[in-house]
Image: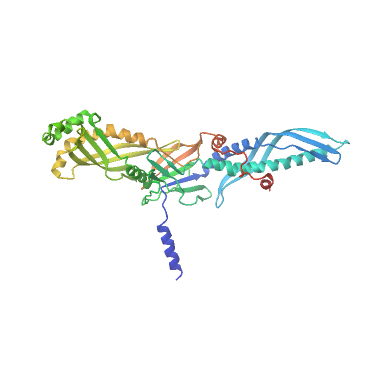
Amino acid sequence: MALLPALFLALLAGAHAELPGCKIRVTSAALELVKQEGLRFLEQELETITIPDLHGKKGNFYYNISDVKVTQLQLISSELHFQPDQELLLHISNASLGLHFRRQLLYWFLGIYNFFSTFITSGMRFLLNQQICPVLYHAGTVLLNSLLDTVPVRSPVDELVGIDYSLVKDPVVSNGNLDMEFRGTFFPLTEGNWSLFNRAVEPQLEEEERMVYVAFSEFFFDSAMESYFQAGALQLTLVGDKVPSDLDMLLRATYFGSIVLLSPSVINSPLKLKLQAMSPPRCTIKPSGTTIAVTASVTITLAPPMLPEVELSKMIMEARLSAKMTLRGKALRTKLDLRRFQIYSNQSALESLALIPLQAPLKTLLQIGVMPMLNERTWRGVQIPLPEGINFVREVVTNHAGFLTVGADLHFAKGLREVINKSRPAIAGDSSVPPPSTAAA
């Protein structure tokens, strides 16, 4: 009987589990690149360590070792691989270190070379252990974490909306991959606590050939369009000379019967054309491609100065756009094309027939005047959660049922040291650096 309550709680938890809008998989193919750049950074850090002077006496032997500098560092053998439950494991062996120092020695008898050699070697090893361990600790837990701090988690996309890349669960590490699930949702900047329920298909990642794979569900794109809709961005108003002259003449001719009955002060008023989305557009991703469905109202009025507007017509516009996704650097960009377009009246079928002559010129207006503005915004792209200085290269986009995946390799546009130096806080007096004795232990 105890099994039923447990099963009920498990189902209840699953029903409330948040689905990711974005997933990222880092494969073992990326680790060699990460390892080489990471080791180069560690070598640069170790070459800057300061080793204190060593001086004193032992019996009749007096010594002073000063100006110790690291002249050469080689991390000959190293391995970086995924390890379940431990995430990443870095193993370094057969490392060699070259030193330069000044020595001052005073002794009262000859024949102590072996003693001197053993003593100096032991002393240098002790000093190096006291300095290298804190540097490795600091580089691994403080400086590299400052690099991870450059990953955007919740940040603005533009002046209207932001993107939330919060993790919805802990990363999962297997022998070959690191899988991460992100909320992947947009939100209006004016509504910080705004949320949208994710009903889309959960994206899946199966590939392992490229260094990185990123998957986006339909929810990722729907939340973007919902956010812009809530922010009031999905509307366009053209007045007067902003309306193409050919379209202006056609509209006045179409509604001549209504215009001629108006007062003379209104007849020659500027024409106003307003397009406004009636509901958030919706994205559909299929193996054959990605489409976006838009339903908008088209309102045509005369706008006399200092007088109320006079509505001539209000129609419904349905459009279907094709969307081509591209990854450049670390920005996901979209190019839109108008594929299908129709207008009709929600008042009567007869009025819908009267709108047929407006079909072609309004479609031309969308293609020439509206689509370039949309593409200018969508081509700016949205940043993928990667640390600064790392970009995607050799991208391949693949459509699936309900989601799309982008496979790519990684490229360090900047060295780790350059990125970390730019983002690191003031290190002096940093309490996160442990004392030498603690690190050495």
- The structure residue drawn at horizontal position 51% and vertical position 47%, both measured from the top left corner, is 177
Give the colour scheme of this rendering.
rainbow
Q: Nearer the viewer, residue 78 or 370?
A: 370
Residue in the picture at 23% in, 35% down: 273
Residue with the most extreme right position: 109
Q: Between 338 and 296, which is closer to the camera in this rendering?
A: 296
Q: How many marks?
A: 0
Left or right: where does residue 100 sit relative to residue 315? right
Residue 172 at x, y percent in the picture: 50, 51
Q: Can you name the residue that lies furthest to the front here?
A: 306
Location of residue 247 by image quarter: top left
Q: Seen in the image, is 293 located left or right of residue 394?
A: left
- The percent position of residue 391, horizontal first and vertical second, equals 48, 36
- Position of the N terminus by quadrant: bottom left
Which image quadrant is residue 162 in? top left
Nearer to us in this view, 67 or 263: 263
* Residue found at the very far bottom of the displayed protein: 1
Q: Position of residue 42 (x, y in %)?
A: 61, 38
Side of 412 where 20 appears, left or right: left
- Name the residue: 78% across, 33% down: 103
Placement of 301 over or under 13, stated as above or below: above
126 on left or right of 7: right
Q: Position of residue 120 (x, y in %)?
A: 77, 39
The residue at the point 42 percent across, 40 percent down is: 156
Q: Is residue 435 above or below residue 412?
A: below
